[in-house]
Image (cartoon, rainbow, N blue to C red):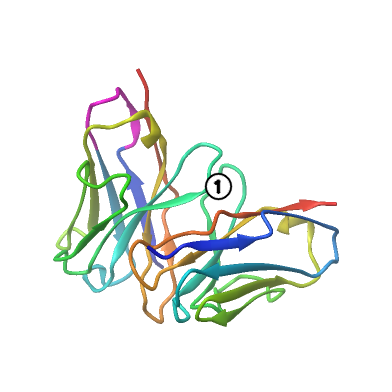
Amino acid sequence: DIQMTQSPSTLSASVGDRVTITCRASQSVSTWLAWYQQKPGKAPKLLIYKASSFESGVPFRFSGSGSGTEFTLTITSLQPDDFATYYCQQYNSYPYTFGQGTKLEIK
Amino acid sequence: EVQMLESGGGLVQPGTSLGLSCAASGFTFSSYAISWVRQAPGKGLEWVSGISGSGDSTYYADSVMGRFTISRDNSKNTLYLQMDSLRAEDTAVYYCARVGPTTYSIYWGQGTLVTVSS
């Protein structure tokens, strides 16, 4: 199975900050990597698919990059609505594993 | 518009069975692999099971292998998850998701809650 490791687990930041979340795969997943945002009691919301493809309707302050085993999600100019938990998921090969999540908190 | 709607969740006792359904619309259902993903209370996301577009190939997480069965009816645009020998640790919100290595986007349903408790 491919293990996905996200860092950091918790991130404290302020409105207007630029933040980066990293996701590392234990073996190559090519670019089959998605990023989700989740708020309490809600379904995950897709932000980025295929490592860097923007999901329709998602603000352009969210961007993804990477390929192979190293991926990043960058949020420029944090907004109050962005404080949530973020997950990466590889869908290169079954089982389609998730990272453990990164909780983005207000500093 | 792509829509995926789960149903069938509820409260069941340990050791019993429950079946979930996921009704899909807005795309050619038989062309896409679909997965079930769950989230236990206060925990992260866990991929549970997947099935190819034709239904010929199925995949399971080790935690549910031998207890859960995924299937699909492409004539009804519906995905199923039969859950047997349920355990307390199967308590979670279960989501269906159209996800797979294609150039197209990913879609999730809103989830259905399964509670296993005596």
Label 1 amino acid?
Answer: Lys
Quadrant where the C terminus of chain B lies?
top left
Residue A74 lies, in percent from the top left, at 70, 72
Which residue sits at x=36%, y=36%? B90
Q: Is residue B22 left or right of residue B91?
A: left
Q: Mark 1 points at which residue?
A: A42
Quadrant where the N terminus of chain B lies?
bottom left
Chain where mark 1 sits: A
Residue A104 lies, in percent from the top left, at 72, 55
Which range of residues does the magenta coloring cover? B9-18
State yes or no: residue B10 in magenta: yes
Residue B51: quarter of image: bottom left
Viewer-proximal residue among A71 and A39: A71
Which residue sits at x=29%, y=45%? B64
Q: Residue furthest front?
A: A26
Residue B45 lies, in percent from the top left, at 48, 51
State yes or no: residue B87 in magenta: no
Viewer-proximal residue among A31 and B115: A31
